[in-house]
Amino acid sequence: MADVAARAGVSLKTVSRVVNNAPHVQPELAERVLAAVAELGFRRNLLASSLRSGQATATIGLLIEEIANPFYATMAEAAAEIAGQHDTMLVIASSEEDPARERQLLRDMCARRFDGLLVVPAGDDHSFLRAEVELGTPVVFLDRPPGGLLADTVLLDNRGGARAGVGRLIEAGHRRIGILLDSIGVYTMRERLDGAQDALAPAGVPYDSRLIRDGVGDPASAARAVAEMLERPDPPTAFFSLNNRITLGVIEELYRRGSDATVLAFDDFDLARLLPYPMTVIAYDTRELARTAAELLFLRIGGDRSWPRTVVLPTELVSRGVTPGAAPAALEPT
Amino acid sequence: MADVAARAGVSLKTVSRVVNNAPHVQPELAERVLAAVAELGFRRNLLASSLRSGQATATIGLLIEEIANPFYATMAEAAAEIAGQHDTMLVIASSEEDPARERQLLRDMCARRFDGLLVVPAGDDHSFLRAEVELGTPVVFLDRPPGGLLADTVLLDNRGGARAGVGRLIEAGHRRIGILLDSIGVYTMRERLDGAQDALAPAGVPYDSRLIRDGVGDPASAARAVAEMLERPDPPTAFFSLNNRITLGVIEELYRRGSDATVLAFDDFDLARLLPYPMTVIAYDTRELARTAAELLFLRIGGDRSWPRTVVLPTELVSRGVTPGAAPAALEPT
DNA sequence: CGCTAATCTGACAACGTTGTCTCTTCCCCT
DNA sequence: AGGGGAAGAGACAACGTTGTCAGATTAGCG
């Protein structure tokens, strides 16, 4: 910048004013400065800039569990869109469901003085963020609530959605429903399971631990779990998959067997419409989830110091998948 | 930091040494400093740190077209993994295929003094990066080559893959092959089209512009294009989809019609196995693409100044999808 | 016991910006 | 014509850290 100033024959400060589009600079001088900037290929150092001005790195962080999962990828895209509207860069980091990694990444983002953080929590204790929050870094949690910290949170109606979905299964006469979940340690899984029980209990369906399978982390183990349940003397007539990854394994196994079991699944995704098995999906607006959280974050960054809010977004039941073996039916328009 | 120094009764510099694990600090002093750090909740400012030390923001950028596309999401995940191995943060930005946005984002990343950049180019002129590259910011291009700039590039064998795939269609007797592509302006599309012609020409199949459809940007328009081609007097017996998004529309339309046209598609993806229509997919290792590029980038960041390299990764033909109406067959294991 | 060397610590400047304040100039109004 | 005020430009310090160098302390050795 000093070089540019020398070249244009002005002071450092004037160059600063020009590159920041500050007022009170004569057009003639500005032109000389811009010419010098172009000639010398000068690019202002944003590090120094935000160091000096104290805040505003024009960066927010998004901590998710896994980038390649379409659920999180969609959230990232929606958040990036909102960030772009605020001339802010979005940094996406992936915790891989590891609380230690989550902690390290969040600390790192704080050390880099990000303007705010969007967090899908992996761990259940976020008290280590309290100092940062009090120091002025806004944090908004989404999809899952924080632990040991009062902060803005945007959630889905996991429990209500599961209740409605399982309720429909019960209306259709199902009494033996196999439930597959990733990990009972995860908030969303607990809520969805609770929602299922909300519907099962009043219908007089007894609790049967053999119909609930925890620790189903990937499609292959979901397929195995389905196979085992089906091979027992009194097999389930319906399956409730608690996330999109599990759904894939369930569909695969049922398709392979030519089964006619009914499928209820949490999480909608683009390709669900084209999967070769009919199912009812508990859907919600993933983009809206991320958008709401991001907008809330920018409210906070803008100085909103009101009491932390919790927003819960609704879910709905939709039909997905196609029927194999049946005459090809018209799909819904894209 | 000054507060910490005062609290611990040492100098600023000693605190700096302690938080950087520098040698030559008495254990007793270090302990006092660490205690003060903990009490005051001190977190070192990485902005100031990398400003002072000149380089090493421990950040690299990845510019892709669209986060929610599984192709790019997978690349992002693989790149993030390599970045993590180098204690570096990965910043993902999305250009939405807009050259102006690409330019702005890359400039921004340079202004933030990222240690290096991974770029899937949207535009065809990257000469604006030359100054940065010469100034020492390593840039590696992937999936598509840069324009007007000599730099490391990691590509797929688009042309060879398309040639092999179309060759197989020709062996099976197909002569009327509908080809659908996103935009002829995109490098990968041109290469894949050239590969198709490599196979068509020697087989004596004449060029027929009605069988090539450009500008198919989303599944819905792919479905429409397929419908129109099939309703002509001499319909294609096979379709070649040049990317994953187009493939979805093709499959949807063919399934809806109960057609028996053969499908060849570029790009594999997780759920392709479960789509309700059989097809041959030109597959490649997306993660390897990103890994190779990221490793090359870290080589450059590490100081490798050898001549720019171009790496081309192979493709292979695989079977995907299931056959509707047929007896459910065993799927491949996950 | 004195000298050298090794180890440890601190003062200071500098990284590249921008906020603050001051000074100059020029215009407009009374 | 004189005074007030606005506008333009620059000098300087400061943001939070670390590299450099010099000083202080201690240990080791003859």
Image (cartoon, coloured by chain):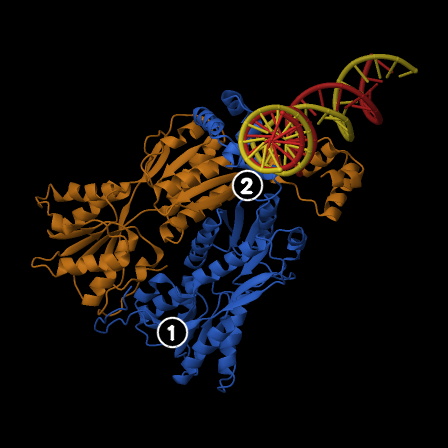
Chain colours: A blue, B orange, C yellow, D red
Q: Position of residue A230 (x, y in %)?
A: 39, 75
- Given the image, on which type of amino acid does mark 2 rest? Asp
Numbered badge on residue A325? none
- Location of residue B28 by image quarter: top right
Q: Position of residue A168 (x, y in %)?
A: 41, 80
- Given the image, on which type of amino acid does mark 1 rest? Val
Residue B21 in view here: no
Instruction: Count numbered badges in the picture.
Output: 2
Q: How much space separates mark 2 and mark 1, taking CA atoms? A: 43 Å
Q: Residues within 10 Å of mark 1 (few under 14, many from 20)?
A: many
Give me the chain letter of mark 2: B
Q: Report helix, strand or loop for mark 2.
A: loop
> Relative to C26, does residue A331 appear above or below in the rendering?
below
Q: Position of residue A146 (x, y in %)?
A: 60, 61
Task: Report the residue marked by disc 2.
Answer: B87
Task: Report the residue marked by disc 1.
Answer: A263
> Relative to D10, does residue A217 appear above or below in the rendering?
below
Q: Is residue B68 left or right of residue A64?
A: left
